[in-house]
Image: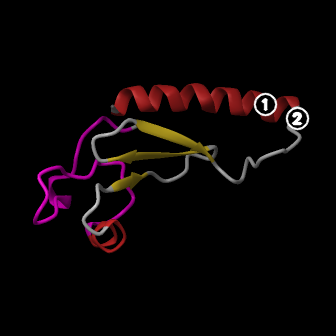
Amino acid sequence: MSTPTTDARRVGANRSTPCPAWCKFSEAQHEEYDKGEPWLHGSESNGFFTFWQLDGGPITATLDESVGDNVDLTIDRLRELAQASLRAVEWIEAHQ
């Protein structure tokens, strides 16, 4: 996992807050979709979770669709999910 840094090249002309280094969206995408609102930063999926942060807000994790809702999980898949959940907590703590 990367260290909590920001990419100074990704600061918009009218912005003082840069994107977190983990954000997968370009400045142009933010300007197109966020249109003057606080930017919503998103990560790539880690296989179980995608991480999100609205400018100035807490980092949150969304369970990926690949895991699904109302899915029967085997013991092995539950263990993988439990381990991924712990890694997600550690990732968020490292990037806040």
Mark 2 → mark 1, Cα distance in angstroms: 6 Å
- Residue 39 lies, in percent from the top left, at 31, 56
Q: Which residue is mark 2?
A: 74
Q: Which residues are magenta?
A: 2-27
Q: Position of residue 12 (x, y in %)?
A: 16, 63
37 vs 81, left or right, is left
Q: Residue at x 70, y 33 (%)?
A: 81
In the shown orientation, is residue 71 left or right of residue 11?
right
Q: Which mark is residue 78?
A: 1
Up the image or down, 31 lies above or below 17; here it is below
Q: Mark on residue 25? A: none
Q: Are marks 2 and 1 in contact (CB under 8 Å)?
A: yes
| Displayed quadrant of residue 1 | top left
Q: How many marks?
A: 2
- Residue 28 percent across, percent down from the top left: 28, 73
Could you say where residue 59 lies in the image, as x and y percent from the top left?
Answer: 41, 38
Q: Residue at x 85, y 44 (%)?
A: 71
Tell me the residue at 27%/41% (across/down).
56
